Amino acid sequence: MIEIEPEPASAAVVFGDRLDVARAFTAALGEHGEERGLIGPLEPPRLWTRHILNSAVAAPLFAPGARVGDIGSGAGLPGLVLAIARPDVEWVLIEPMERRVAWLDEQVAALGLSNVEVVRARAEDWKRGPVLDAVTARAVSALRTLVPLVAPLVRDGGELVLLKGANAANEIGAAEKVIRKHRLTNVRVEPIGEGVIEEPTRVIRATVR
């Protein structure tokens, strides 16, 4: 029997009337995630806190009606979680691995998410040009590696909203060269979810010019 973390009270605050959908996704990921190679064996007992709510608190950062890409969606973190929390935003989940794409497609259908498109591709193989209003990613790679992959997908004036760990500020320092090359402005770290979840999520935000 897989032991999934009990739902924290903060889940209702974060998801509001979308909580039932979030519960269904969390239960599915907790039950099937390890066997399908989506999460490690240590993750179910901390699934809500470390993954679901850590992703979901970024939901208010996106504009209504925006078209947002999630690079390397994997298990659906943060893209599917954000799509659940923000049905008024269009999400494009970009993931190269076939088995993860199959999982994402299954969950989109099971959860009835009409605001999600799943694309099997690597970010560098994106063929549609700079058409997205924003791009997000979580635990994909260091900022200096990530910026050249994701900035070309974003329209002029669009935004990068990248979920990072405690080392976020240092990543900005190490990425100065690529930040200049890709003309990113207003690059900063923002903690989100303070007072709502135990450990705030650190987000690197930047405008693409």
Image (cartoon, helix red, strand yellow):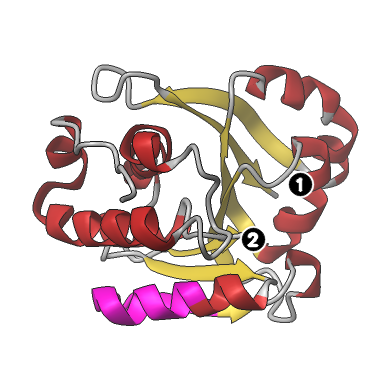
Q: Who's the residue at 36% across and 53% down the image? A: 30
Label 1 sits on residue? 147
Residue 48 visible in the current orientation: yes
Q: Is residue 12 above or below residue 78?
A: above
Discs 1, 2 touching: Cβ within 8 Å:
no
Q: Amino acid at mark 1?
A: Val
Q: Position of residue 63 (x, y in %)?
A: 36, 53
Mark 1 Cα shell of 10 Å, populated few (<14), some (14-19), many (≥20): some
Q: Is residue 180 above or below residue 27?
A: above
Q: Amino acid at mark 2?
A: Val
Q: Who's the residue at 52% across and 79% down the image? A: 102
Mark 2 Cα shell of 10 Å, populated few (<14), some (14-19), many (≥20): many
Residue 81 visible in the current orientation: no
Q: Position of residue 152 (x, y in %)?
A: 75, 61
Q: Quadrant of residue 58?
A: top left
Label 2 sits on residue? 154
Instruction: Specify start and end residues of the magenta stretch as a single range.
Output: 103-118
**Is residue 160 toward the left or the right of residue 171 in the image?**
left
Q: Quadrant of residue 72?
A: bottom right
